[in-house]
Amino acid sequence: MRLVVLVSGTGTNLQALLDACADPAYGAEVVAVGADRDGIEGLARAQRAGVPTFVCRVRDHESRADWDGALLEAVAAYEPDLVVSAGFMKLVGPPLLERFPMVNTHPALCPAFPGTQGAADALAYGVKVTGATLFVVDDGVDTGPIVAQATVPVADDDTPASLHERIKVVERSMLVDSIGRMAREGWSVTGRHVRIG
């Protein structure tokens, strides 16, 4: 399975995928890494691994629609089977979503706590368990069909930062396991149900 991975930051999820893809038995290959800004560690990780990179910044385009088109063109050049949003902090538009399947991770148990503050929102609400969700991206915010979820207990002394760090550990494992299974066994979506194998 050919993967294009989109990043916005340090690229720890990307690194987990790169490490997994180093084993031919894993069944997937990162063919390119794209970002919405330059000079980030995620791009450096890709470059160290010899993976082609591209940058598509919103501010370089006259409109969000122009950016959507440019992002689609950049991704399509690598002919991916799947696009993986791994800490990519931009919502992508219909052009990309209509052309390629895309998955994203979120640091909460969807449908709870969508948006950019999943760990902080879970703490503020007082939940005892939270976690991470891998889902198929649709046109909503963290609303797509769920591929996998992993749980993390909330400790009494957690801060948003400490909870988010523990979530990221299970998120990486879930992402690597799920993408590998999707690559080796195939996958399908029927309504809101994702089936692997």
Image (tube, grey):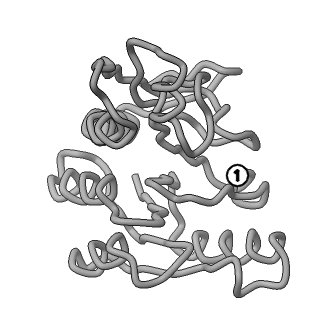
Residue receiving disc 1: 97
In the rendered image, the quadrant that contains the C terminus is top left
In the image, residue 27 above or below residue 126: below
Location of residue 172 by image quarter: top left
Residue at the (76%, 73%) spot, across then down: 69
* Front residue of 62 and 82: 62
Residue at the (38%, 80%) spot, across then down: 52
User: What is the tally of numbered marks visible in this picture?
Assistant: 1
Q: Residues within 10 Å of mark 1 (few under 14, many from 20)?
A: some
Residue 60 picture location, percent across and down: 70, 87
In the image, residue 189 above or below residue 62: above
In the image, residue 55 above or below residue 126: below
Residue at the (49%, 38%) spot, across then down: 106
Q: Residue furthest top?
A: 128
Residue 39 picture location, percent across and down: 40, 84
Residue 59 picture location, percent across and down: 71, 82
* Front residue of 124 and 33: 124
**Horizontally, is 44 left or right of 127 in the view?**
left
**Horizontally, is 112 left or right of 133 in the view?**
right
SS at mark 1 in the image: helix
Q: Amino acid at mark 1?
A: Leu
**Horizontally, is 111 left or right of 185 in the view?**
right
**Horizontally, is 89 left or right of 47 in the view?**
right
Residue at the (34%, 65%) spot, across then down: 10
Q: Residue furthest left?
A: 23
* Front residue of 111 and 173: 111
